[in-house]
Amino acid sequence: MPDPRINHIELDEATILWRNADIEQERRIAIFDLIEDNVFKPLRSYAAGHQGPYRLKLAVSDGRLSLEIENDAGEPLETLLLGLARFRRPIREYFAICESYYQAIRKSTPQEIETIDMARRGVHNEAAELLLERLEGKVETDFPTARRLFTLICVLHIRG
């Protein structure tokens, strides 16, 4: 029975140089939510008879995002490489707004926090739409899955 979803996700720890408690919490939540509910159908692997679930490893190397896709037994199926140039601005904006949000939740009014959170969601949504565009023709996925994947892509870009 087809099960086109991610059941395990791993981030290349060699790529991640540093992360604070707030970012670590974001990472844990994104991974938990992603595993609980996602749509992920790599078109080439699916057409070749591998219908899920999938294991996914994310890494950044030479300015490209690597999505290493494996079957449930951990056997490699395919690796997708996406250029990250178009993600530089959204990642930078997301980091900036997240920093403002983390500071606000410690010392701002609920209205100020809500305003910053709305801006944060807006940047996150735009980046998820961009990721959906970049995955088109390679992986069928949905908007919530793309949002969570973008969060994890950001975690891979933290440089301290």
Image (spheres, grey):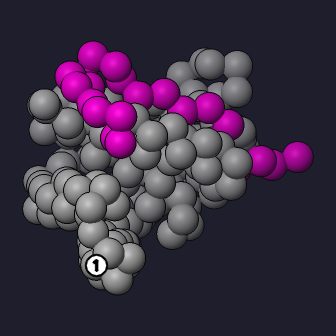
128 or 52, nearer to the observer: 128
Q: Position of residue 58 (x, y in %)?
A: 39, 33
Point out the stretch of residues depicted in magenta.
1-23
Q: Position of residue 43 (x, y in %)?
A: 55, 52
Disc count in the image?
A: 1
Residue at x 21%, y 39% (from the top left corner): 157
Mark 1 lies on residue:
112
Q: Inspect the magenta stretch and tell me whether residue 2 lies in it.
A: yes
Q: Inspect the magenta stretch and tell me whether residue 149 lies in it.
A: no
Q: Position of residue 83 (x, y in %)?
A: 19, 48
Q: Is residue 9 above or below residue 133?
A: above
> Would you say residue 17 is visible in this rendering?
yes
Principal secondary structure, stretch drawn in magenta? loop
Residue at x 54%, y 22% (from the top left corner): 76
> Would you say residue 46 is visible in this rendering?
no
The kind of residue on which mark 1 rests is Glu
Q: Is residue 72 above or below residue 36?
A: above
- In the rendered image, the quadrant that contains the C terminus is top left
